[in-house]
Image (cartoon, grey):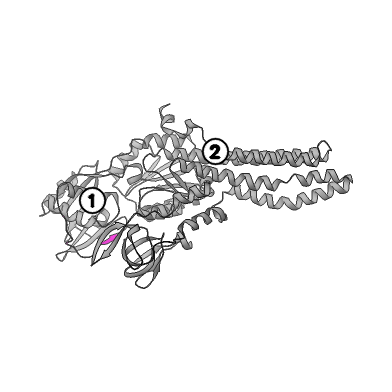
Amino acid sequence: KSVGDLARSMSLNVKKVWLKKDDQEILVNASDIQPGDTVVVHMGNVIPFDGEVSGGEGMVNQASLTGESLPVRREKGKTVYAGTVLEEGELEILVKAVSGSTRFEKIVTMIEDSEKLKSALESKAEHLADRLVPYTLLGTGIVGLVTRNATKALSVLMVDFSCALKLAMPIAVLSAIREAGQHGITVKGGKYLEAVAEADTIVFDKTGTLTKAKPTVKEVVVFGDYPEDEALRIAACLEEHFPHSMAKAVVDAAKKRKLYHEEMHSKVEYIVAHGISSYIEDKKVVIGSSHFVFEDEDCRIRQEMQERFDTLPSEYSHLYLAIDGELTAVICIEDPLREEAADMVRMLKEEGLKKVVMMTGDSERTAASIAGRVGVDEYYSEVLPEDKARFVEKEKEAGKKVIMIGDGINDSPALSAADAGIAISDGAEIAREIADITIAADNLRVIVTLRRLANAMMKRIQSNYRGIVGINSGLIALGVGGVIQPTTSALLHNTSTLAISLKSMQNLLPDDKTDPDRTAKK
């Protein structure tokens, strides 16, 4: 039951796809697609069907199917598979099969059979059980030779450690994963719960994780010859192609102002964690971070506008739009902090995490403001995806156990590098694909529940181990001493194994521990 519940929660779940018909892209239900149709997959999205690339090119992350850590290039004529993720580029895919995806079966197999997903304690127990078999047989022989009593020798044979060890430990892990699912947490294997329990450092991406991922445009400050509405219209025209909360805020702001932004640009290029570039009427247009616009693209600010630029409101995140090498507008975006963020950080520290870190691509001023309100131990501003991954690797080299939490394409390298990568469920497809654990987006306090659940699982496994060794050792001693018969030893052994297994199926957390809101109010 636990395996089935987990596999269903992780199965491929694509409801809408872009169908290419008569040179137009139409958003349709995935269930309406038939073999022979052509679908378009944009960067950062999951590939919904097995098929052949009929147009475009891109880099596809196939780790979920092949285990390859590096994305592979896919171009016209190459085969792509459902469940893999397009990291870069854009692909037109001629659909070969719409059903029979092995995604569900693959995940069931992964959970049931893959040694690498078992916790270290679980694997240790299984290996110990295997090693004990010859010793049990040897012990039986020695007792028989020394006592010349077949009944006493059988008492040793009737009590086998390996049965209880191999049965109770996996049940404890699968039950913990099932219980996590009840709280909106999807865990891909027991080793990741163990990593969460052992972690001493946790790293948060800011946007979409500590904040609500529902940013809104508060102000558009113009610096060039374009009026405010026209600058916003151009920005929305570029941003609508890419799955990011900031992009959605710009598009929504244009819709509110009834600014219709038909395609007026050439092919757009997205540079991860930097921005977007394209051409409109032979003029290069870029939109993104200050680093991208002013350093990478070497755009300038009119001298008479410098004072306006220096007094931009620091409480907002800024999106910079430049046309033909000159700053045109700055879009001020507010991304409200989650109400539970500060409480969540405090409770994580109470649960034993020693260092809480925030990383963001925002400016130093914005990052400092958020970090102070949340209560993190360290923060880093204006970071790139490789900076996040490098920080995680550095902490691991220093002997730390690291959890990384993020929701975007730019968090993927760090999620992959961490001991346990946690993705927000409504974030980018690639983040969820790479992450080891996925949590619901509605309340960050579920991370506290995850930590408590992981700690409780480890305590239960250790308790089971001590109980199995203690009970069975006692039964062997009583049997060899002639106190109980082999049939009684076998009965008590099987009864204790069943009792420990049934106990392992119980929920790990009492009701007051599964409700972090209640804990926060105490």
Can you give x and y, in whole percent of width and height, for residue 159 in the image?
A: 75, 44
| In this rendering, the label closer to the viewer, 1 or 2 | 2
Q: Which residues are magenta?
A: 260-270
* 7 relative to 501 in the view: left or right: left
* 316 relative to 480 in the view: left or right: left
Can you give x and y, in whole percent of width and height, for residue 110 in the image?
A: 52, 56
Give amino acid for label 1.
Leu
Residue 265 falls within the magenta-colored stretch: yes
Name the element at disc 2: helix
**Residue 436 is at least partly visible in this image:** no
Nearer-the-camera pick, 455 or 171: 171
Q: Main secondary structure of the magenta part?
A: loop
Residue 178's disc is none
Residue identifier under label 2: 456
**Residue 150 is at least partly visible in this image:** yes
Nearer-the-camera pick, 45 or 7: 7
Label 1 neighbourhood size at 10 Å, few (<14), some (14-19), many (20+)?
A: many
Residue identifier under label 1: 319
